[in-house]
Amino acid sequence: MVGKGAMSNSIEELADTDYLLVLGSNTTETHPVIALRMKKAVRKGAKLTVVDPRKIELTRWATRHMQPKIGTDIALLNAMCHVIIKEGLYDQSYIDSKTEGFDGLAAHLDMYTPEYAARVTGVPAQDIIDTAREYAEASPKAAVCYTLGITEHSCGSHNVQAVSNLAMLCGNFGKPSAGVNPLRGQNNVQGASDMGALPTDLPGYQKVERPGVREKFEAAWGFPLPKRRGITKITALDQMLRGRVKALYVMGENSIASDAHANHTRRAIEACEFVVVQDIFLTDTAELADVVLPAAAFAESEGTFANSERRVQRVRQAVAPPGEAREDWRILLDLFEAMGYPQTMTTASEVWDEIASVAPILAGISYERLDTEGGIQWPCPTPDHPGTMYLHKEEFETGGGIPGFFAPVDHIAPAEEPDEEYPYVLTTGRRRSTYHTGTQTGRAEGFELLVPHEWAEISPQDAEYLGVEDEEVIEVATRRGVVTVHAKVTDRSPAGTIFMSFAFPESTMTNVLTSDAYDFITETPEFKACAVKVTKLAVAEMAVPAAD
Amino acid sequence: MDATTQSSTVSEALLEVNGTPVPYSEGGRVLGALREAGYDVPTLCYESRLDPQGTCRMCLVDVEVDGRVTQVASCTAFQQPGMKVTTHSDELKQYRRTILDMLLSETGPQAECPKCLSFKTCDFHSATDEYEADAGWLKPIAPRAKALDPNPFIQRDYDFCIGCFRCTNVCNDWEMAGAITVDGRSQNSKIFSFFDNELLQSPCTFCGQCINTCPTGALTDKKIVGKTVAEKLERTKTICPYCGVGCGIQLLTQDGELKGSEPDFTAPSQGSLCVKGQFGSWDFVKSADRLTTPLIRKNGELQPASWDEAISLVASKFEHYKDTDGPDSLVLWASARVTSESNYLMQKFARVAVGTNNIDNCSRT
């Protein structure tokens, strides 16, 4: 494993790479502006291999499209590593000086022949061999990009490990236009983690339970701090249902519509005795609250967002918040005060200065610099540090740093596989013009003409078999829930696969369907695979038992 | 390298622009040298992110190499050591003015230019003002016809089209969307989508790059054109509120009210946006559904309350659970949507005021 949950390299560098391996990322729709750099690279001669079960738009620019069965990425990646090891295409000097565990990995991968992987994934063995050779040949100027198609599986953290093994084998770290690049889904998902809004980490990825860390923060903040790590969202939901968690405070998140297995999320939040939701709209989640606090939107706030490439950028207030709505950080300062812990900060800039004083990776960043220089990429340890375009450069140049460890991983099938009763696989994601749970794009004029309602994308073969017409309203059901939705007959979906977004929760609450399985390390839910059945609505209505 | 930037390689060799010495930049274009020297010429077909075309002829300059003088388009011509560049001779100024006169004679009246009226003086009319262009001596030619297109985002007033083709180039070369192209030749040329169809039926993704590169009022943001006054508009640089790319945007406000957004070309995203950042990043903020007052559940219903009441209720409840069930009976969820400063304060609040590490965000969901 190498690095943190951020792109090792920068968006702009992608345009100069020689090889792009894009896994589980519908980039042209979910990160359209990053896709531009990919297209630019292709135009300049780079090869692009897209690994995605669906025939996504990016395949139009791809030199190869591999369509593995959903949830078989590890088999595919392991087989690529197998080929690279068997054919001696790896970077010996990088492995010797920067990594540990190569021999163990090589032995482990012995069984992952391309032929074996072909049986598991459905991808032709020759495609796997060719991709492995091309990736190795282009290294160390070969970049891997992935999105939630890799992480939102019950084997998500192992998927990431398999990606990391591949990149380390070919020495793709610490160099420009290379690396492993998770493309982050939300405007400040990077910043939220950077700030230590994590049960295990204090600001700047300093571990709560690492000796000395808590003491450092106790000294900086002047109060004793809790010793043990906290609980993740997934664990919290379980503990709400068990009555161990009594109160919940949610800021800026519509958990019911965005989290997997929505009925479970709803039951858990309802089980809390006291719920506070701070948001800009009365979301599905806010409707369950005991207290709702009206927050300012981005256009009404001062602050920063950190993007996918670790770039901290200024957010500036353009208009005043409506009515009595207030910036989130101001509300929090009031709560500090009311709880008897008054803070001295009075502006967003002063909050940032405190952040910089406790998080070494951000220590060199100030509003003054952001205003004059523009966004700065962490790590930026000192005021004269220019910021970091790609990670591990110094370790690479100086021979220092912590070695990356090759952790062997095995193929793990999705927790719920299709069977006779639920014969299709549902995978979820976003579309270009409808964002997340639709609270924003759903209120943007004109967008209704682009995607008018939720679509269950279904292959022409499956539609024909079921007798479903384009735009016909169908019923999609799993063991956890059922929704009605318009069918979209398209060859983007391979046979056996249904795709839906979750942007129209008021009419189609997609996440009542999604799986209750999650990755056992990160506790990220398996949004990308669950078993569903699809029924024509007329048939579904007839199937309702009579009243007697 | 785009035509306006100089390479960073230090060179001993020089060239001269209007007598001012400028370091020679290998592979650099003449346009870059003259801007380096502090001069400027209008550039209507040129856009820094695209390959230079040299078709509008506005950036024409005299260059003298080995005693021979030629006229070249400075956006396409390469620099040479010892080159002497003249940018504003009477002949060149007259030449530019004549081109602008002709372009004025085939476009709609400046007083009706949608960009000049609603956004800011467009590049084309800035040039016609600077060169005091006047089409009075020319027989007017019927402008290109407006496109009747029902899409909700892009207004296509081709009566202001000057045929620079930046829109088709940005669509095909930068976005690689391939939604529009040029049909016909010369004055009969026009911007065309497949089968002359509506943009909603084309591969257009409504990224809005065409309206942002257009140097005239031919392409504008339909959601706001006509609803703003150029002189009253204010622009605030900030970051798009959608995905993790973090594209730079400028929010447009007038009299304290949000009106729209434009790309921030100075940001690392280089002016790129998608449909969300271009057309969907601001009107949700103005939605009538916004929460405007704290709400407290009373008798099963959420009812308006004062901030004081809401804050003291939350604080006292948190105190209660902290004291009776322990700090770990509370859970806080921060947000990938709000600023880092707010996330920082929420985790600090959880740890310091509540006394729990039960703080998480949606990066796993």
Image (cartoon, rainbow, N blue to C red):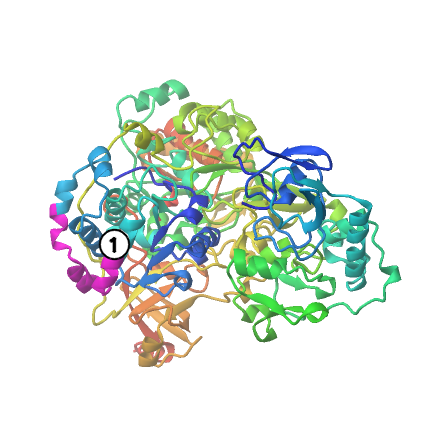
Q: Main secondary structure of the magenta part?
A: helix
Which residue position is annotated with label 1? A132
Looking at the image, residue A149 lies above or below residue A122:
above
Q: Which residues are magenta?
A: A107-130
Residue flagged by tag 1: what amino acid is it? Ala
> Does residue A172 appear left or right of residue B64 in this picture?
left
Looking at the image, residue B146 lies above or below residue B34:
below
Q: Is residue B143 visible?
A: yes
Q: Residue furthest front?
A: B67
Residue at 36 percent across and 36 percent down: it is A391
> Does residue B360 appear left or right of residue B242 in this picture?
left
Element under disc 1: helix
- Disc 1 crowd, CA 10 A, few/some/many (<14, 14-19, 20+): many
Q: Position of residue B62 (x, y in %)?
A: 72, 46
Q: Quadrant of residue A230?
A: top left
Q: Quadrant of residue A487?
A: bottom left
Residue at 71 percent across and 50 percent down: it is B71
Looking at the image, residue A228 lies above or below residue A325:
above
Residue at 58 percent across and 43 percent down: it is B28
A270 within the magenta span: no
Q: Position of residue B26 (x, y in %)?
A: 55, 40
Q: Is residue B293 visible?
A: no
The quadrant of the picture occupied by the N terminus of chain A is: top left
